[in-house]
Amino acid sequence: MAKVKLGINSTCTHVGEVKDTQFKGAVSPIYLSTSYAYEDVEVKRYPRYFNTPNQEMLSKKIAALEHVEAAMIFGSGMAAISTSLLAFLRKGDHVVLQQTLYGGTVNFVSKEFEKYGIEYTYTNGWKTEDFERELKPNTKVIYVETPSNPLLTITDLKKISKLAKAKGILSMIDNTFASPINQNPHDFGIDIIIHSATKYLGGHSDILAGAVAASEAHIQQIWNAAICYGGSLSDHTVWMLERSIKTLALRVKRQNKNALKMARYLNKHKDVARVYYPGLRSHPDHKIAKAQMRGFGGMMSFELEEGSNASQFLNSLQLIKPSMSLAGVESTMLCPAATSHALLTQEARDEQGINDGLIRFSVGIEETKDLARDIEQALHVVKQLQFA
């Protein structure tokens, strides 16, 4: 019988379920055991080997969502990022990294690579020629993030993949901001796809996890490193993540719709100096985003007009939460300079264009009229304080 191609909501709901063969329950049972039989079994299971029943089946769901052969679940996004990079890099190797990246990734590279003798270079932009300019004979990995955190820059995945394959270099992407609903990098030739599953895959601000999706061969190499580093995830959290992914497409599509409305609203606002959102036609990479994304995502950032205090604005919000992290069903805002990119030096933030007044906006599933009303009243408070 030919394999049936499922729709996105059916994939989110049904692929990678653990079947309850004993009681026929509608949801996956949780296997919390840390000890399994090793004789006369097909698979020797152990939590640190990433192959408990819940880990194994959730990996299949994520692989299906990213259109690849295999996947792995990690204890955090940084565990997924660090393990994937170290699995393919050795002393004397070189990696080219995109200029605009998640602050935790930049912090990991700057603090850890030197001790391992791994060379690295950041691009001066996110265009393909910016990457090509930094390649060396010992370059083994090109690492990108698109849309990027927090400035929502867009990198052309097809061109990056073509460049990497022509040079025999592995390509990696942090696909967190897009989620598999909006973008499947493997369809454009990218080798390794990484997620902070804490964000859209989890979606409810109650899970810390990471994921990597790739070919069987690449996942095997990552697994070889991962069992040494110990970044596995508890099966209770794995079960929560599988439950959350069932509504992934529904959540993300609503967040896409809301974010586009809010970006247009902020872009026209007299008290907002600039909006960074790839769904706006004024965004310099809008055409690329439109070509490789099915939706523009729920993330944006913006700057208030000069003289407005960003901290006062955030503290004046009543509905939108000034909160760390992103991609929950609730809308949140933060200043990247004080949170996600606080570990970077001032010089590094300046190079990326992250000023102290930049606000990152994770748009949730609320009604946009309520979000706009909250922003209006917060801006009114800031103005009153400014001229008091």
Image (cartoon, rainbow, N blue to C red):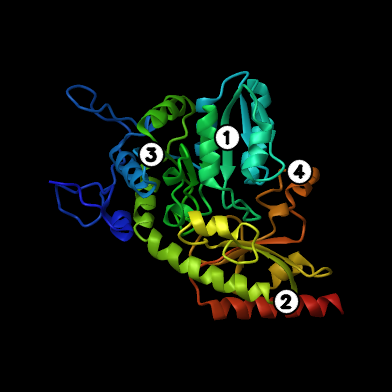
What amino acid does circle 2 point to? Leu
Tag 4's secondary structure? helix
Residue 323 occupies quadrant: bottom right
Q: CA distance from mark 2 to mark 4?
A: 29 Å
Where is the C terminus found, in terms of image quarters?
A: bottom right
Which type of secondary structure does the marked residue at label 2 adopt?
A: helix
Which label lies toward us, 1 or 4?
A: 1
Asked which quadrant contains residue 160, the reply is top right
In this image, 38 relative to 133: left or right? Answer: left
Q: Nearer the viewer, mark 2 or mark 4?
A: 4
Q: Mark 2 and mark 3: span between their CA atoms?
A: 44 Å
| N-term-proximal mark, 2 vs 3 | 3
Between marks 3 and 4, how big is the CA–CA gap? 33 Å
Would you call the spot at circle 4 few (<14 residues within 10 Å), some (14-19), or many (20 or more)?
some
Element on which disc 1 rests? strand
Q: Position of residue 333 (x, y in %)?
A: 63, 63
| Marks 1, 2: nearer the viewer | 1
Tag 1: amino acid: Ile
Mark in front: 2 vs 3: 3
What residue did someone put label 2 on? 379
Q: In this rendering, which labeled residue sits more in front, label 1 or label 3?
A: 1
Residue annotated with mark 1: 142
Q: Earlier in the sequence, mark 1 or mark 2?
A: 1
Q: Position of residue 32 (x, y in %)?
A: 31, 41
